[in-house]
Image (cartoon, rainbow, N blue to C red):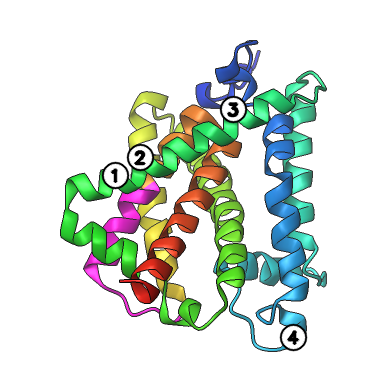
Amino acid sequence: MSKTRKEPQWLRFGTGEGYFDRSHRPLQCLIFMAPLLIIYQIGAVLHPWSPVHGPTHNIIAFELMLNFFSLFGAVGSYLPPMAVVAIMLGWHLARKDPLKFEPGLYVAMGAESFLWAVALVILFLAVDHGLAMQALTHGVTHVMQRLSWQTQVVLSLGAGIYEELLFRLVLITVLNMILVDLFGLSVGKAIPVIIIASAVLFSLYHFLGNEQPTWGAFIIRTMAGIYFAGIFIFRGFGIDVATHAGYDLMVVGLDFLFRHHL
């Protein structure tokens, strides 16, 4: 008689009725993220970095998803957000979570995400003030600096959604399947490897564009990747996405402040 495959413990978060559990649920995460998805998609149509307006300065993760869909003959900027919705709804149905709309929950998730984003900025400053200031004030690339602040805001939201989708939700799940299901590694031993591996790949991914690689940028982004992975595993995908987007918005704000007012 074959053994029933056990779902990873971190995927079983959300089975209770408290705030910690409800904020993990896929449907609640999708509803919470919906404004970010909508704003980014509107920006993809109205802003000049959209593929329909010529050369794109899009989020690399978004473009990778477009390229993936094109392999199967499917094209259109609506495909990535549809994929996010399909994944979250499929996850919701598989878990058989209750169907609820909870406005108070989303406000609390937004507040928590903001605190996590602020904490990341403070963490960088505490670890290495010089390196942190370099990352925070020069984290917006020269390509981004040539864009309007409105477009930078939209791109920040897109990074939160699609980079977390690829490097946390998809990559961490795949690595878990390989290390735990395929090679039989215990969850306790696999999680640190998964977090570090996903963080390193997340950091290296940023150099796929036109940015010049530096050790400082690699280190700071690897640290951020570890941070986001921990939030994804222990606090859920929705809060993880909003934390990443919130942090990127703070970087854009600091860059604007230092370039125009200091």
Name the side, left or right, on which 106 lies relative to 225: right
Specify few, some or many for label 4: CA neighbours under 10 Å numbering under 14, 14-19, or 20 or more: few
Q: Do the residues labelled 3 and 4 touch (CB within 8 Å)?
A: no
Residue 198 in sight in this render: yes
Residue 176 in sight in this render: no
- Whole-percent x, y for residue 235 in the image: 51, 29
Specify few, some or many for label 1: CA neighbours under 10 Å numbering under 14, 14-19, or 20 or more: few
Q: Do the residues labelled 1 and 2 touch (CB within 8 Å)?
A: yes
- Which kind of residue does numbered mark 2 sit on? Ala
Q: Which residue is drawn at 32% across and 54% down?
A: 222
Residue hosting label 2: 119
Q: Earlier in the sequence, mark 4 or mark 1?
A: 4
Q: Is residue 72 above or below residue 180?
A: below
Query: How many angstroms separate mark 4 from mark 1 (CA)?
Result: 38 Å
Range drawn in magenta: 210-225
Residue hosting label 1: 122
Q: Nearer the viewer, residue 245 or 166?
A: 245
Q: Earlier in the sequence, mark 3 or mark 4?
A: 4
- Whole-percent x, y for residue 206 in the image: 43, 68
Q: Which of marks 2 and 3 is nearer the N terminus?
A: 3
Q: Nearer the viewer, mark 2 or mark 4?
A: 2
- Whole-percent x, y for residue 234 in the image: 47, 28
Q: Is residue 227 above or below residue 22?
A: below
Q: Which of marks 1 and 3 is nearer the N terminus?
A: 3
Residue 110 colored magenta? no
Q: Nearer the viewer, mark 4 or mark 1?
A: 1
Residue hosting label 3: 108
Specify few, some or many for label 3: CA neighbours under 10 Å numbering under 14, 14-19, or 20 or more: some
Q: Nearer the viewer, mark 3 or mark 4?
A: 3
